[in-house]
Amino acid sequence: MAVRPVRPARPRATGGAAPPDPAAAAEAVERFLDALGLPAETRASEDLQGTPRRVAQAWLEDLVDGYRRDPAELLAEAIPSSSRDLVAVTGIAFHSVCPHHLLPSRGVAHVAYLPGGRVVGFGQLVRLVDTLAHRLLLQEELSRAIADALVTHLGARGAACLLDAEQLCMTVRGEKRGGARAHADAWVGALARDGAARRRFLALAGRAGAPARGARRARR
């Protein structure tokens, strides 16, 4: 199967880092495969011949591409609004990568905010989740980053994010508990306080009540 070339990286990189280098990434994967001590016939197999380039492509385009997008710019395209009622989008499918083992996770995000004079399109909330999920963040940090972005860059009076995901670092290694789910909640501003809006969001997310036992919660 032909492998499509990696799309050129955007010129801007965050934090002063060098822009992505697809060729260097592919070379690093090549060395990684060599270091695994695979049987010679396996390492030389046709299946692995294009793997370094495919892996580099997957990482740069689908797994850590969030570093080339700016949440502030994403939320800058807002619409003035006098509404102060809860805005929520639930059931947003997302994928991310655990920074500890570089193994993926997949799950759903529920996001809500209380407008502070501006609102954004629902699609922008989905893109915000993707932008931050496609960075090397722990699930707890990801939930907080999403909620914080809505308060900091949109001017929301309060924001919340609930994440429910399968972490492969827990289900295929370590404890190896298939079916285990990891939960992380972040509550910021007005939504950090109990009230009708918070209870409404929990009901919309299918969690009308306290978070599941063992869930980790981030507050500010």
Image (spheres, rainbow, N blue to C red):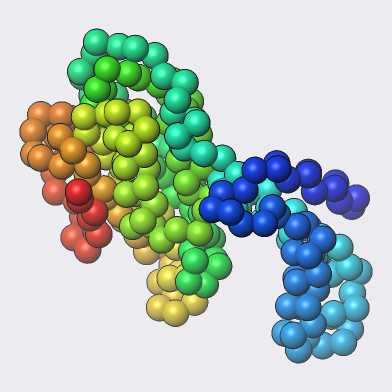
Specify the quadrant of the image occupied by residue 54. bottom right
Q: Is residue 163 at least partly visible in the picture?
A: no
The residue drawn where x is 44% and y is 79% is 174
Residue placed most toward the observer, 189 or 199: 189
Count of residue discs: 0
Residue 25 in the image: above or below residue 195:
below
Residue 141 in the image: above or below residue 174:
above
Residue at the extreme front: 16
* Lateral position of residue 157 relative to residue 108, left or right: left
The residue drawn where x is 15% and y is 29% is 197
The residue drawn where x is 89% and y is 68% is 49
Specify the quadrant of the image occupied by residue 192. top left
Residue 144 in the image: above or below residue 102:
above
* Residue 106 at x, y percent in the picture: 49, 53
* Residue 71 at x, y percent in the picture: 47, 37
* Residue 76 at x, y percent in the picture: 45, 25
* Residue 202 at x, y percent in the picture: 21, 37
Residue placed most toward the observer, 220 or 36: 220
The residue drawn where x is 75% and y is 64% is 25
